[in-house]
Image (cartoon, grey):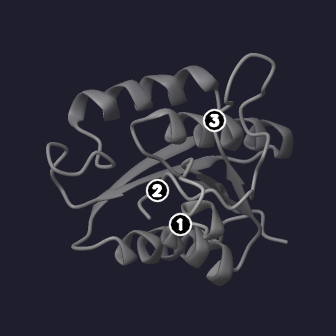
């Protein structure tokens, strides 16, 4: 088992917030750091997953307040399949102990498949992967329903 940090695929939305929340909880529990990875096509105006400067500043402040050792990385990729490749690259580079991804809710048809990014990361990661989704309503806890196959919040 790796003693490297936890890698979290982060997007500037509720899916990224849920993934970050779980990653920080796991990091505290395990005494590890967190490497937050934001991947997109390089323009927050056309790619909602790509964080603009204000979102990155807010992320950095949240991480600093968490007390967890952290690093933030942002990468530009030409297409969605490259999002998974970048997350896997970072996880391998830092010898990640765990990868955490946020899952998007999908239509009934979409629920048949895990999103392409989450599917590839789950399949190809050398370490365990936790997939979480935001709570649906009162009484739900963020992170429940992990791995339910509803798609992913990191680009697929």
Q: Which residue is mark 1?
A: 115
Residue in front for this viewpoint, 46 or 31: 46
Q: Between marks 3 and 1, how big is the CA–CA gap?
A: 16 Å
Q: Position of residue 13 (x, y in %)?
A: 43, 35
Identify residue for label 3. Answer: 134
Q: Is residue 123 left or right of residue 44?
A: right
Corner quadrant of residue 130: bottom right
Secondary structure beneath disc 3?
loop
- Residue at x 57% of width, y 59% of height: 151
Q: CA distance from mark 2 to mark 3?
A: 13 Å
x and y, in percent, of residue 100 in the image: 65, 54
Give the residue furthest to the bottom.
124
Query: In this rendering, which labeled residue sits more in front, label 2 or label 1?
Result: 1
| Residue 140 on image: x %, y % | 78, 26
Compared with residue 142, is residue 99 higher up or lower down, i.e. above or below?
Answer: below
Q: Is residue 129 above or below residue 126?
A: above
User: Mark 2: few, some, or many residues within 10 Å (few <14, many ≥20)?
Assistant: many
Q: Which label's residue is closer to the chain start, 3 or 1?
A: 1
The tag earlier along the polypeptide, 2 or 3, is 3
The spot of residue 111 in percent (x, y) is: 62, 61
- In-front residue for pair 127/30: 127
Mark 3 Cα-neighbour bin, 10 Å: few <14, some 14–19, many ≥20? many
Q: Which mark is residue 72?
A: none
Q: Nearer the viewer, residue 127 or 95?
A: 127
- Classify mark 1: residues with Cα within 10 Å, few (<14), some (14-19) or many (20+): many
Residue visible at 38% across and 77% down in the picture: 81
Q: Residue at x 35, y 58 (%)?
A: 39
2 and 1 marks in contact (CB < 8 Å): yes
């Amino acid at each position: 088992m790796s003693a490297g940090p936890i890698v979290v695929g982060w997007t500037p939305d509720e899916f990224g917030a849920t993934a970050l929340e779980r990653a920080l909880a796991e990091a505290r529990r395990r005494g590890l750091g967190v490497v937050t990875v934001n991947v997109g096509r390089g323009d927050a105006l056309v790619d909602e997953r790509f964080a603009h400067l204000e979102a990155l500043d807010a992320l950095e402040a949240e991480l600093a307040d968490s007390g967890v050792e952290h690093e933030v990385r942002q990468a530009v990729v030409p297409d969605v399949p490259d999002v998974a490749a970048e997350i896997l690259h970072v996880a391998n580079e830092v010898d990640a102990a765990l990868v955490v991804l946020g899952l998007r809710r999908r239509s009934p048809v979409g629920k048949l498949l895990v999103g392409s990014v989450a599917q590839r990361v789950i399949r190809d990661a050398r370490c365990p992967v936790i997939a979480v989704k935001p709570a649906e309503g009162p009484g739900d806890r963020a992170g429940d329903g992990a791995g339910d196959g509803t798609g992913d919040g990191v680009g697929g």
